[in-house]
Amino acid sequence: MMKAADTKETKKTTNEVDELVKRSKKALAELKSYDQAQIDELCEKVAVAALDNHMKLAKMAVEETGRGVVEDKAIKNIYASEYIWNSMRHDKTVGILEEDAEKKMMKIAEPVGIVAGVTPVTNPTSTVVFKTLISLKGRNTIVFGFHPQAQKCCAETARIIQTAIAAAGGPADAVLYIEHPSIDATSALMHHPDVATILATGGPSMVTAAYSSGKPALGVGPGNGPTYVEKSANIKQAANDIVLSKTFDNGMICASENSAVIDKEIYADLMAEFKRLGCYIVKPKDVQALSDAVIDPNRHTVRGPVAGKSAYEIAQMAGLKDVDPECRVLIAELKGVGLKFPLSGEKLSPVLTVYKSSSNEEAFKICDDLLHYGGLGHTAGIHTTDDDLVKKFGLAMPACRILVNTPSSVGGLGNIYNNMTPSLTLGTGSYGGNSISHNVSDMDLINIKTVAKRRNNIQWVKMPPKVYFEPNSLRYLETMAGIKKVFLVCDPGMVKFGYADRVTAVLNQRVEPVDIDIFSEVEPNPSSDTVFKGVERMKAFEPDTIIALGGGSAMDAAKGMWLFYEHPEASFLGAKQKFLDIRKRAYKVPVPNKVTYIGIPTTSGTGSEVTPYAVITDSQTHVKYPITDYAMQPDIAIVDPQFVETVPPRTTAWTGLDVITHATEAYVSVMATDYSRAWSIQALKLAFKYLKASYDGDQEAREHMHNASTMAGMAFANAYLGINHSIAHKLGGEFNLPHGLAIAITYPQVVRYNAEIPTKLAMWPKYNYNTALGDYADIARAIGLPGKTDEELKESLVKAFIDLAHSMDVTLSLKANRVEKKHFDASVDHLAELAYEDQCTTANPREPLIKELKALLEREWDGQGVEK
């Protein structure tokens, strides 16, 4: 018989759920009146708000749950905002979807209604963002039941979303959650008569409860995914993919490889590559101890405290004493599958079991057995160059995602390494007792069996349509069509030293008179306040041409003015957001196309005259943001060496070292191409040959450096940069250091760091495996430096840079450049995190951890390994 206290608690729970559903129902009625444009605007606001808080929510999730990796959860949060919204941005989900006059058919979209959202402890905040977006896109409301161990971080995510919805004029109650989590409360929500459907992500018992509720439910099953590494596979790529996948958020994505089945012909080589990448091969005598530590003997599933822990932590639990603290993955060889081999099940951690196969048939049998032991319907992977074998594997495996030459964890989510629908809820079809077999989105509910091959993104070469160079190329302004009203943007020095007069003198030689307004208030590290001040001037003047005259500061400020003058509705908050893929960013920067932008550099370093970059300091936070979008690509660049004839030696040194860094980072970028690398190498040849002479005042050398600067700009405009710039951006903002100086101090440390075997592997489909050391060696060979091995050549490159800097009286430490130790120590943790969040970080050849960025900064303070 139920006790009175229990009855009272049950009634309290029921009342809370009833009130939440009542409020959600009211919000649903309001959303039903929205048209497509209104609902899309609401979704974009939610995506941007979540994106703006991705790091904060990642840290909260790890702190509260004690699981996973902050940096990887940050990527999940970006993915849940950027990739999910990008994938459905153009989906028509309101009103008439299709109308076929010939067939006399029409499709009309109506909201499902109130969605009950159940979220897991493994991917808490990203799942909240994902489920909110796919619900709102169809004008649905959602009420969440969060996992109790992740209540705080999920509640904060919901609060951020509610605030964004309210700010956009929508009903904040479109997203609600149970404030006092319990199994009874979640059950009451799923069984509530006014709840239309259930989105369930969690453990088997929760998903089963969702399907038993009597409501339509979209859920997932457990994932015990195998991957088959066939003898024709690219061994380095396969090892890279598997380690990347198993270490991503410490293996908590359910699509991650739990076992690798390896052909005997390549078994030894692949295991050696695993070891090279920092994995630990468990001794046969220790496999049982590891199994006991990882798998619960009663449930035959992973122990709760193990999921999401690091390989080293798990090794300690198992009593493995000789495992390095930096170990990536624990790898254990097994001979069978099932209850007698507990470790063959799903592990949700950086623990991988391996099997040796003697044939395709044996490998297929092992993979099938693994899927039948807790992974039916989920995910299976194969690494091979045999397309016929891919087809056979896809036909044979009882899995709804067959991933080819792909890291299964991020590959299974979709749209990073393949063209599957991006999602954080992965259906397992009838194999796994699910109603759907595809990646959950705003699509239909039929079983779909998908074979997805790895693909490389289409890349590009983009630059201004016209680049004029050689002495006196400024003369082009005499005859250029369409110039009547010029807004000239520069700093006070350009006016004081007569450079602005040179430009106006040429303009005044035109047949038709030209109106000119000079905005000469740009400061070093231009601020958003300066940008918007210039915009107000432009509104009053109404120019047809904007000329940016100066170094990077003037050109970057002018780009901001150009954008916000033509598109006052543009969002600085949206434009400054970090993205993983420029084509998929959550916020689409509008393209200015009425005013012509002309960049005229007066220093040889920035390259901004040909790039889509604009580094703007947020006046509210004082943080520098490298805003990047091809909407801000200049129309014309005039690279005239007359403007660098009298640049002071110190400035010449700093900007020239920045040229070297631009070209180097573009060359080793994960997005480097044959095209960008050609520009990089030529720029590096010129810079190492002519920078010292340019510093000494040689005019021919200065012309060569001016061209090198622009070529380096062309390279990184298309291949992007790396953490050398991420760190320097933050050092400059915090300690008021000139950009080129901060860049130079950072360069030797970053080259050496990138050339190591990485802790975290960089993620980009065309970047098959880490090549940074070899790339640095290629640069050294190209510019004629000595060395027999890649390591020696890399060190020759570092030494050549240091020697060149020293020859120009540039000391490569923060300490020597008036950075106080107390100020540095108080700032270093925050700077490391800001550097991680910097846009340039995404193209670095090594995915950095925040603690590693901190270590680099600490080395920079006193120039460790660089300065004596």
Image (cartoon, rainbow, N blue to C red):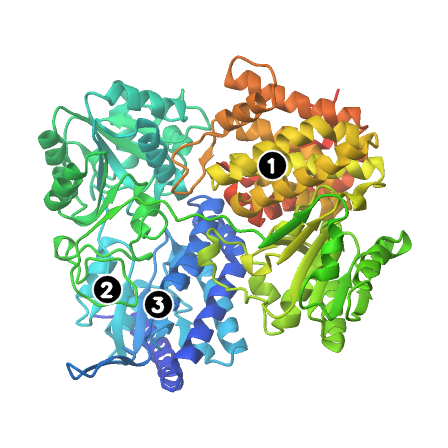
Query: Which residue appears at 82% of the width and 36% of the height?
Result: 650
Name which residue type carries label 1: Ala
Given the image, on which type of amino acid does mark 2 rest? Leu
Residue 416 appearing in the image:
yes
| Residue 663 numbered mark, or none | 1
Mark 3 falls on what kind of element?
helix
Expressed as whole percent of the image width and height from the top left, the position of residue 225 reads: 23, 42
721 lies above or below 686:
below
Q: Is residue 320 visible?
A: no
In the picture, measured across the screen, residue 51 lies left or right of residue 550, that is left
Identity of the residue drawn at 38% across and 73% down: 136
* Mark 2 Cα-neighbour bin, 10 Å: few <14, some 14–19, many ≥20: many
The numbered mark at residue 218 is 2
Where's residue 89, x and y in %?
Answer: 39, 67
Quadrant for the N terminus, please: bottom left
Residue tagged by mark 3?
134
Q: Earlier in the sequence, mark 2 or mark 1?
A: 2
